[in-house]
Image (cartoon, helix red, strand yellow):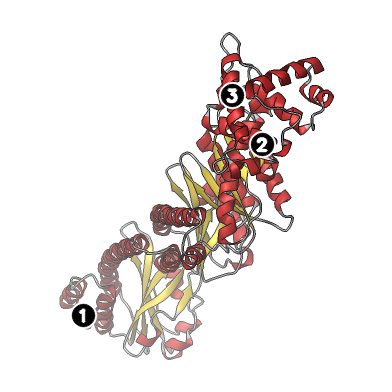
Amino acid sequence: MAAKTYGPDFLYQIIEVISSGPDLQTILHGFVPLVTAATDCHGCFVYFVEDGQLVLRAASAGYSRLEGRVMLSLDEGLAGWVARTRRSAFIKDRALEDPRAVFVRELDEEQYQSLVAVPILSRAGQAIGVINLHARAPHEFRKADLRFLENSASLIAGAIENARLYEEAIGRVELLTGLSRLAQDIASAATMPDLLRTLTAGCRKLLGASRCELYLAGSDERLELVAANPARESAPLLDVGHMWPQLLAAANQEGDATQALSDLLWGQLVTGTALFAALTAGDERVGLLGVNVPASTADRRSLLTSVASHTAVAVRRRQLIESLEQKTLLKDLFEGLASGNADPQWLRAQAAKVRCDIESEHMVLQATPWAASSPPKGKSKPERPRSPDWPEIATRLEARLKMELPRSLFDRRDGSLRAMLLTPQGGADVVIATVRHVYQSLGGGREGPMAVGLSNPCQGAGAIAKGFEEASSAAQVGAMLGGGAGVFAYEQLGAYRYAMTAEKSVRDRYQDRLQRLVAYEERRGTALLSTLETYVENLGSITRTARSMHTHPNTVRQRLSRIEHLTELDLAAEDWLSLGMAIKIVKLRMIRGSDPTTLPAEVRGS
């Protein structure tokens, strides 16, 4: 009997095995043969309680192949009864006839007649496992046998708990090492695609997830899927502005919010548990990281939060680098196109880097700051709504036009905004209408804060170079002539387009004579130059001139007489076409060479 086959030496040997090290499998494989020999049984089986069932973790020689494969419910078998009741039990004979026994074919239980099982109890008194012994012949287990097994179970219980703590510690170290390695890989990614690929693959492996996806917030306040492992082609766009509270709730593992977000993003793709972490950099909303894991654990949630934190910083850093690189490329391209003398091959190469086809039709936009003039002394300025500041409206104008006119390019600086707007199917009219609508919707008006010029449509490097000149002229001259800020197309400048061409290259007697009127007006504050311009445009009709200027015909006659006296011109005999162009050139020179707030109202409003 068992009492004759074991003594204190067996317990000492068991203690030595347990003290041999923290590796649980080594301990178990040393423990099982000792118990088998001590009890004179034919089979010893050690089960662990895992996820609500008993799993075979160690077995006598001949059955070791079944370790990890044999699983029993806690509601069946003698081992299950012992685990539930936390009491030892044995069956002396005809084991399979006992209602507490369950037949396991793989363990050859039809050969055995006697069974004994003792619980393995934790320090807290919970059943963490069961030691099961089988004997072929009727085997009389006595109290001394049970005490030996229970003492052995107590010793192995401490070893199991210590080994599990050790394994958990090792596991956490491995997780932290993996997290550190992933954080380094994310931080050192050379490009955004490399970063996204490294993140999703590494995060999926680190958390043991079946799926990992990253969503980033765009300028349109929507979250877009940018990387997924395994890959998938499309995903719904999420409105960050409206859904951010729900996303934060899901990231905090609030049940309903997490499930709702999981259903929205993955639907039937989810077979495990969804976990989410919001990506933030300060107060900035960067994106959302989601994984699908077998089960939600504190370690997994903590790791996902850490990965999200590293990712947010790396993504914003990479976005900033790429933004600066993009700005440099755009700046060089715009400067090259505006100069008109850059190497064509270099221009094509630069354009390709920013995905621009300069042979497609574009319209050039030029925007510059504009502030309304102050009222004359003694007069109060009427109350008007505050206009947005230049940096604010320039940023918002660029963001809106990127959405309204896709594939357009922008070069924004402290005091200017230039753009090449890709012309849509509707042509130039659509571009002009779109820019005006966006400008007004952002709070821009005649009071400021910017003047926007648009060129004629242009294709090819040469035409685009002229487009930069046209857009600049439209912004500057259009605002001066219009008497306020706004959006001005080059076509709106009318005859001034030709005057700008001849402003520096043509000098004639008309310009010299007209400068006398300019000097006279500076001293007297009269409106002689604008009267002469209106008279010429109305082909010498005093009646139409008076009607256009809302004045009396005699006043017009008096001014014309004064003009002829000052300029020594005979208006009836002069070349009115040349005279009309000379007037435009002189007025343009006044506009460009003077503070617009000091120009006569007749000049600014003509």
Q: Which mark is residue 125?
A: none
Q: Amino acid at mark 3?
A: Arg
Of circles 1 and 3, which is in front?
A: 3
Which image quadrant: the N terminus?
bottom left
Asked whether, in this view, residue 15 is left or right of residue 519, the answer is left
Q: Amino acid at mark 1?
A: Tyr
Q: 10 Å neighbourhood of mark 1: few (<14), some, or many (≥20)?
A: some
Residue located beneath label 1 in the image: 6
Q: Residue at x 54, y 71 (%)?
A: 231
Residue located beneath label 3 in the image: 516
Q: Are marks 2 and 3 in contact (CB under 8 Å)?
A: no
Q: Which mark is residue 440?
A: 2
Note whether 451 is above or below 21 in the view shown. Answer: above
Q: Amino acid at mark 2?
A: Gln
Q: Within the image, what quadrant is residue 44 found in? A: bottom left
Measure how far apart labels 1 and 3 are at the Cα level.
130 Å
Q: Is residue 89 visible?
A: yes
Of circles 1 and 2, which is in front?
A: 2
